[in-house]
DNA sequence: CACAATTCGATTGTACACAATTAAATAGTG
DNA sequence: CACTATTTAATTGTGTACAATCGAATTGTG
């Protein structure tokens, strides 16, 4: 018999890992209409809050680096959701802005978070608790 | 101002998504000695429990499909951790078993889960709660 | 102002992840 | 027994992820 500590079902990290993947799967049909993937949807969420942001700042917000963001943003640009342009103040900086189409998408997206939460069958208490614990864990893991 | 519902920081799914990625980053140095990635480590966890398993059953256990598992298992085979072989009873089935080296790795792995949990700074209560809620959510999302 | 250090994005290489398709083998049905 | 349906891995194509590196631009220091 395997060590209890090493049993798959005892691994909180496995639950986390598997749940995240099942979550993005459930989001896929909800995001189909917007023609974005889940990570791309996160970029939209940021831009709906800020209008204009550098790749660097976007990466910090989403915990993603340029190796992930650069190709992703190019795809989003091809799909007409955003525009990318070098900053005039600092040529090293690339700034991302929403297109008209990208702005319009916000209205379509309004129902999505609730539609997802309904599928989880979690009650409000559990959602709040989960969010709190994950926030604490994320902040801790993000430290040096 | 953006819709409250659509704010990034209100998205429990984003916390889930970001925390999972930070988690696998933290695991990387812990798994270096074993020469495996986090998903590969999950395969080892299953094999330390079962000795022998089909790709199909492994995928069901880990919520992964053959498109992910086949190349991953081939890499693990190259690294000498597992062996893959067609079943004699049913030629369609590929069975995975640990090598001697793969079995040995279990001893080295014993400290890993605790080492990780220490880094999260979560107390026992929070860990139990989190695991419970994620299990419930995962089971729900995994349904048709 | 020179010039080393830093910052920023892009690129490269490796490794998942998954939908869709294919091919081989087996099981089920008449 | 023929023949269809099903099961199972593998393959293909697209899209993240991230470490490591590069090159261009800017900043800090003397």
Image (cartoon, coloured by chain):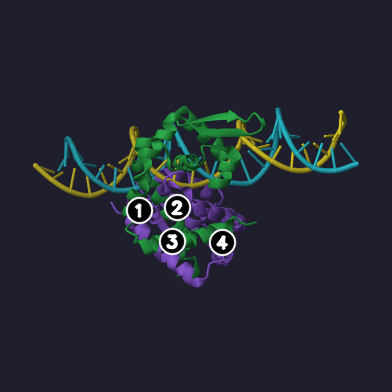
Chain colours: A green, B purple, C yellow, D cyan
Q: CA distance from mark 1 to mark 4?
A: 40 Å
Q: Position of residue B73 (x, y in %)?
A: 48, 48
Q: Position of residue A31 (x, y in %)?
A: 37, 40
Quickly name the residue at label 4: B105
Query: Above or below — where is B53 with respect to B65?
Result: below
Host chain of mark 3: A
Q: Secondary structure at mark 2?
A: helix
Q: Which mark is residue A96?
A: none
Lower position in the chain sequence, tag 2 or tag 4: 2
Residue depicted at 45% across the width and 31% down the height: A81
Host chain of mark 2: B
Q: CB under 8 Å between callouts 1 and 2?
A: no
Quickly name the residue at label 1: A117
Q: CA distance from mark 2 to mark 4?
A: 41 Å
Whether labels 4 and 3 belong to a single chain: the reply is no
Q: CB under 8 Å between callouts 4 and 3?
A: no
Q: Which mark is residue A130?
A: 3
Q: Position of residue B69 (x, y in %)?
A: 44, 47
Query: Above or below — where is A122 with respect to C27?
Result: below
């Amino acid at each position: 018999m395997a060590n209890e500590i090493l049993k798959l079902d005892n691994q909180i990290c496995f639950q986390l890992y598997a749940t995240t993947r099942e979550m993005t799967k459930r989001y896929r049909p909800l995001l189909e209409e917007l023609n974005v993937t889940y990570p791309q949807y996160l970029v939209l969420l940021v831009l709906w809050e800020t209008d204009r942001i550098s790749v660097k700042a976007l990466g910090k917000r989403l915990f993603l680096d340029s190796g992930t963001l650069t190709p992703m943003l190019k795809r989003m640009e091809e799909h007409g959701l955003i525009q990318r342009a070098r900053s005039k103040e600092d040529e090293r900086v690339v700034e991302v802005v929403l297109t008209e189409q990208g702005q319009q998408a916000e209205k379509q997206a309004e129902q999505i978070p609730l539609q997802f939460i309904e599928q989880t069958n979690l009650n409000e208490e559990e959602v709040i608790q989960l969010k709190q614990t994950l926030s604490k864990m994320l902040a801790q893991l993000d430290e040096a």
